[in-house]
Image (tube, rainbow, N blue to C red):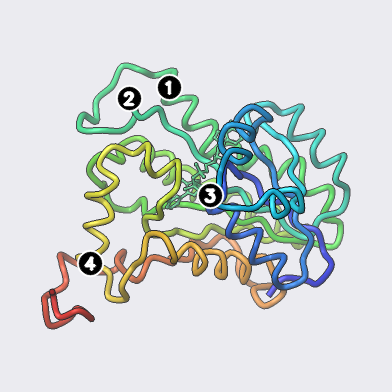
Amino acid sequence: MIETGATYVVMGLLDPDSIAYSVGRDIMKYGGKVIYTAQNERLKSIFFDRSKKLSDEEKQSLVIDYCDVTKDEEVKALFEKIGPVAGVVHSIGYANPKTALGEEFHTDAIEDLKNSYNISAVSLATVARYAYPQMKDGGSIVALTFESTRAFAYYNWMGVAKAALEAVVRGLARRHGKDLIRVNAVSAGPLTTKAASSIPGFDELSDTWNKQSPIPWDTINDKDEVAHAVNFLLGPYSKKITGQVIYVDGGASVIGGELLPHERRDGGA
Ligand SMILES: NC(=O)c1ccc[n+]([C@@H]2O[C@H](COP(=O)([O-])OP(=O)(O)OC[C@H]3O[C@@H](n4cnc5c(N)ncnc54)[C@H](O)[C@@H]3O)[C@@H](O)[C@H]2O)c1
């Protein structure tokens, strides 16, 4: 588990449905201090502040800063301001649903693809670059990814960005081993969030999970299971794990085809 009293930066809070929110809540439950980051104040006020899922008191108890990961100076300023940290969670991704996701894989929107690649993959290196000076005694960086070894319908260029993100994880693991900083990713099954709702065909993706996952997968409540794995990777029990992608997906990623009725917990009902 995480270190009591240590500071963790959890990046990618949009609203209480965000995976980032669940991760931060889990860190606090085990005694860590959390600084969340949202992309900017405008998005936070539209989505987080207006959400009815948390009371005003609960909202005000959270520490939320701002950081657009495409802006080097914002990432640099964030970590200089925060000071020493034990871990950082990168729960950030973006692809234009009109050009990079959907029925047609081919696109001429190259600028959109570059933007998606920058936000979803390259930014992990930007974050690591400015966070590592604040991890003088070592630390842990964890990114959120999605199964990138198979090509899923609709997920198109986000799948490509996730494959790149996982390669960035390995590159950073190699670079920061000497700093005793571990870099890993958690590959989550489909979860109901704002980012997920912008994926055309998300329901089909969830349906695929339902048919493949040996352990039943719950797109809402299993955010907590993902958070537990992130926190394992942030904490001292995973000290010799780096450069890895840990799957928290009910096992769907290792199954060929669909489960047969007798293999399902519900008997295929
Ligand atoms: N929801 C799923 O099914 C699922 C499954 C596996 C992995 N993931 C990954 O989990 C991560 C979090 O997504 P989520 O599902 O919680 O959705 P979300 O929409 O709640 O979070 C995505 C976050 O990325 C942020 N972001 C986008 N561009 C940014 C930028 N330029 N600078 C800073 N932040 C920026 C958004 O503001 C938002 O806070 C993403 O990497 C996503 O790909 C999601």
Mark seen at residue 18: 3
Measure how far apart labels 1 and 2 are at the Cα level.
10 Å
Q: Amino acid at mark 2?
A: Lys
Q: Is residue 127 left or right of residue 151?
A: right
Any mark on residue 98, and which?
A: 2
Left or right of 224, for residue 133: right
Instruction: Choose the circle earlier in sequence order: 1 or 2.
Output: 2
- Mark 3 C-beta closer than 8 Å to ligand 1: yes
Image coordinates for residue 167, horizontal then vertical, percent: 50, 48
Alpha-carbon neighbours of circle 3 within 10 Å: few (<14), some, or many (≥20)? many
Q: List the residue tagged with mark 4.
A: 212
**Label 4 near ligand 1 (CB < 8 Å):** no
Across the whole image, how many numbered discs are drawn on residues?
4
- Frontmost residue, 38 versus 152: 38
Q: Name which of mark 2 and mark 4 comes first in the sequence.
A: 2
Figure check: 60 above or below 105:
below
**Label 4–label 1 contact, CB within 8 A:** no
Front tag of 2 and 3: 3
Alpha carbons under labels 4 and 1: distance apart:
32 Å
Q: Nearer the viewer, mark 3 or mark 1?
A: 3
- SS of the residue at dot 1? helix
**Three-letter amino acid code at the position of disc 1:** Asp
